[in-house]
Image (cartoon, rainbow, N blue to C red):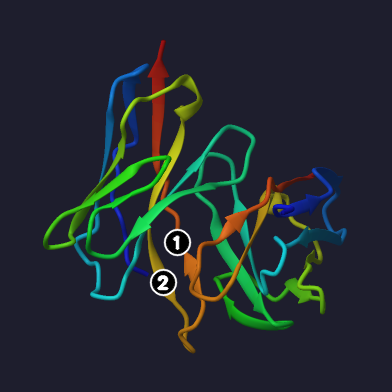
Amino acid sequence: ETGVTQSPTHLIKTRGQQVTLRCSSQSGHNTVSWYQQALGQGPQFIFQYYREEENGRGNFPPRFSGLQFPNYSSELNVNALELDDSALYLCASSFPQETQYFGPGTRLLVL
Amino acid sequence: DAKTTQPNSMESNEEEPVHLPCNHSTISGTDYIHWYRQLPSQGPEYVIHGLTSNVNNRMASLAIAEDRKSSTLILHRATLRDAAVYYCILRDHFMGGSNYKLTFGKGTLLTVNP
């Protein structure tokens, strides 16, 4: 059984650019949650997708958006990048009400 | 969001038991208590969770106080590979109820000495 995978592992962008991060969920999991982890902090919830619909959102601006595909993989898009968007971006997959399993993350650096 | 309080750091010796405490005085009756850990440069790893009764699995044990206002994660014999940040989390349900988000604090940095 394949675990949660994320791509790319590292990324460098400049302010104002746009970025797309990808997540493949663990086999069969239909729910994907995205989290942002700044250096020295715990992960913060961005949003969640369940069966291709956004199912809940944390305190992040609309320039953070996402998609979930029929195979339950997911994308996180961030527009108009700011320096403070530099962080580790984590996705977690699960079934509803069951344990969330995290991927290794994508480290984004905004210059 | 329900909140948890953990010590910033703890230290242990290899092959000794470790008791990681967590206070959650505002816990509601339906909040599950989850523990995750995060090794350096990795995503969080699920450790254990429980609601009311003590729980055991191959990684750890979770002892939950009778009033549920605190819990303790127990690593029975710490190894160097257990050095990580340990997060105690109360699961927050969404509107619609079937899914939830995890609200992380800063966790406890566990150092294991050889």
Q: Position of residue B26 (x, y in %)?
A: 22, 66
| Residue behind mark 1 | B103
Q: Which chain carries label 1?
A: B
Q: Position of residue B25 (x, y in %)?
A: 19, 61
Q: In this view, does B1 lie to the left or right of A17?
A: left
Q: What's the distance in space between the residues labelled 2 and 1, CA to CA?
A: 7 Å
Tell me which amino acid carries mark 2. Asp
Question: CB atoms at circles 2 and 1 under 8 Å apart?
Answer: yes
Q: Where is residue B66 in the image (x, y as percent from the top left)?
A: 12, 60
| Residue behind mark 2 | B92
Q: Which chain carries label 2?
A: B
Mark 2: few, some, or many residues within 10 Å (few <14, many ≥20)?
A: some
- Asked if labels 2 and 1 share a chain, the reply is yes
Residue at left offset 25%, top offset 73%: B28
Q: Which residue lies furthest to the left in this view?
A: B66
Residue at left offset 40%, top offset 20%: B112
